[in-house]
Image: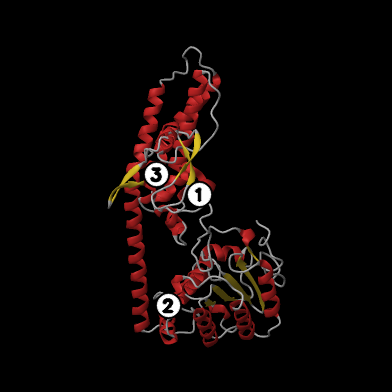
Amino acid sequence: MKAAPKRTLIRLLIAPMVAALAVLTAGAPGAQAATDLSTVAQALRESPVYVDPEATDILSESDAEALADKIEDADKPIFVAVLPADYPTENLFRNLRTETGVTGLYGIRLGNEFDARADSSVLSSQGVQNLVTAAQGAGDAKAQLNDFVDDALRNLGGSAPSSWSGGSGGVPVGGLITVGTLLAAGGAGVYAVSRRNRRRHQEEQRAALEKLRVVVDEDITAFGEELDRLDFHPAEPGADDAMRTDYAHALDAYEQSKRLMAEARRPEDVRGVTQAVEDGRFALARLAARREGRSLPERRPPCFFDPRHGPSVDDAVWTPPGGAAREVPVCAADRARLADGQDPMIREVDTDYGRRPYWDAGPAYGPWAGGYFGGGLLPGLLVGTLLGGMMAGPGYAADYGADYGDFGGYEGGDLSGADFDGGDFGGGFGGFGGGDFGGGGDFGGGF
């Protein structure tokens, strides 16, 4: 844990930037006087306590610093915002949690009133209500917030977000610090580092997409070849409306996959492409069954070993090298190979370490696999693999998208972005009137 003097210096560097942004927002033509919520969220990603420039009479700079030190020293995901009484309350908790994107406990002092919400992974809804009840009778803001934090530290799960431990933490108490030459230089340095990191991240994302593009183009090409081999003509003898519908569906999926790939800008955009390809292949399987007079196939995921093998026909037990056995969907050919004790025909892709199975090729293949296998199925298929381990990490959703199924969920302090369930972000009650302040709003029972 970093020392308090260092934290204080960092806060002195960050605070003028946040305060200046708030002033600019308030003074812009047509802008609302209230500090934009994205500014509040950015400040909370840097430090556990934010005091609005219009609420400095509620909690002093020194008290805010001491409260932030207490939270950071305890390494717990507690976020405290002090806002003026007239701050807009509609969906405030939900929007702040979305903007901040970090799992944790959120307490807000709004004028003379207080309420809180939390992700269920760190504290139950009833636990939050108990904390709020105890804090509401504690007196002034300093006593109230300290009591709230003290009680929360004894009950809260999870750990502080990594963004607090880096070089950008701070308690932004707007308007209390004079911006000198040193502070301006420090602020410029922080901005430069942030900009450089963002640019590097964007370059990494582009590089990952280009590697993935090769594999996806192979999938689309293989799907197009299947369309050609089918050699179906809507006006051919024996063709009926059901066949023509399946064929049109497959053609539409083919064109959609090409369009979506051309429009892709990030690896997570690929998920829609492989969803379209998988949907089109199933339409072709239905068309082939109709033409041959067979029963229509059951809707199943594609072959796990290579989705180009088409829809699976069965589930088979397979054990990856060094991993645990699991059931995976397989095509008829791979089912026969496994039954004979042979290796399946695995889809391999180019990596920096040579050709590797796609589940050992890097994080960008999560969206690729997610489009084929959906959210609920994917975790069981990938457990124990390199890709499965990456997708279980707290930062994966922010870089490559979410909703791939339960890879372990988010713990306190994890970066989930907007991927959280309002029904699992609850607690608090009473006192604020409208919006989601008080009375639970739309928290605790879903949206």
- Estimate the spatial distance between the alpha carbons at disc 1 and disc 2, rounded to whole Å: 44 Å
Q: Is residue 267 left or right of residue 155?
A: left
Residue in the picture at 53% in, 76% down: 50
Residue 61: horizontal and vertical position, in percent? 52, 85
Kindly state the secondary structure of the residue where label 3 is placed. helix
- Where does label 1 land, which residue? 380
Tell which circle, 3 or 1, labels the residue nearer the N-terminal end: 3
Is 370 above or below relative to 12? above
Tell which circle, 1 or 2, labels the residue nearer the N-terminal end: 2
Is 220 above or below relative to 416? above
Amino acid bearing label 3? Glu
Mark 2: few/some/many CA within 10 Å (<14, 14-19, 20+) = many
Tell which circle, 3 or 2, labels the residue nearer the N-terminal end: 2
- Estimate the spatial distance between the alpha carbons at disc 3 and disc 2, rounded to whole Å: 37 Å
Kindly state the secondary structure of the residue where label 1 is placed. helix
Residue in the picture at 43% in, 82% down: 7
Numbered circle sitting on residue 263: 3
Mark 1: few/some/many CA within 10 Å (<14, 14-19, 20+) = some
